[in-house]
Image (cartoon, rainbow, N blue to C red):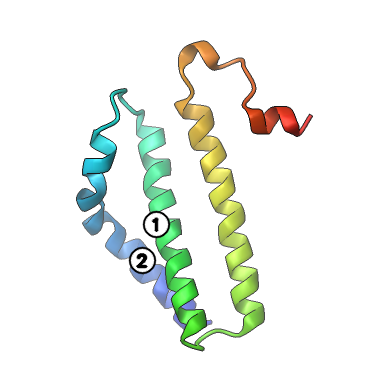
């Protein structure tokens, strides 16, 4: 469990340093993103890196199966929430009142 916490802290510390290397893909977006969306996208990248690190630690045998499954589930739930929030904030102004297909299915 200490390895997991250490790996997460390292991922969080390194993410601001490596973020500019991935900025070119985001720079292709024509619309200007709000500061909140940019922060959520940075958190998403950090979370994805943490999931990859978790998978690596699990395959290396550093984590118990129960810890891996619980942590993975937690990360995935947060990722889903992040993606939904990004989608909600990134929706064009004319579509603010319209429900997404995922929202319509849940009704």
Q: Is residue 34 left or right of residue 95?
A: left
62 shown above or below 50: below
Can residue 2 be seen in this snapshot?
no
54 vs 1, nearest the viewer = 54
The numbered disc on residue 46 is 1
The numbered disc on residue 102 is none
Image quarter for residue 11? bottom left
34 shown above or below 16: above
Q: Residue furthest bottom?
A: 61
Residue 29 rendering spot, x and y as whole percentages: 30, 30
Residue 82 rendering spot, x and y as whole percentages: 52, 44
Q: Residues within 10 Å of mark 2 (few under 14, many from 20)?
A: some
Instruction: Tell me the residue at 61%/61% (across/down).
Output: 74
Q: Is residue 36 left or right of residue 27?
A: right
Instruction: Tell me the residue at 48%/73% (across/down).
Output: 54
Residue 3 rendering spot, x and y as whole percentages: 45, 82
Give the residue pinned by disc 2: 11
Kind of element beneath mark 2:
helix
Q: Is residue 24 left or right of residue 43?
A: left
Can residue 52 be seen in this snapshot?
yes
Instruction: Tell me the residue at 38%/42% (across/down).
Output: 39
Kind of element beneath mark 1:
helix
90 vs 102, nearest the viewer = 102
Q: Residues within 10 Å of mark 1 (few under 14, many from 20)?
A: many
101 vs 65, nearest the viewer = 101
């Amino acid at each position: 469990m200490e390895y997991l916490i250490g790996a997460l802290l390292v991922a969080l510390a390194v993410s601001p340093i490596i973020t500019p290397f991935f900025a070119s893909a985001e720079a292709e977006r024509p619309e200007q993103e709000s500061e909140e969306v940019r922060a959520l996208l940075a958190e998403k990248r950090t979370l994805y890196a943490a999931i990859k690190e978790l998978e690596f630690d699990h395959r290396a045998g550093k984590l118990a199966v129960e810890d891996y499954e619980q942590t993975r589930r937690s990360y995935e739930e947060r990722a889903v929430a992040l993606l939904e929030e990004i989608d909600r904030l990134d929706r064009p102004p004319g579509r603010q009142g319209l429900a997404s297909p995922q929202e319509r299915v849940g009704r």
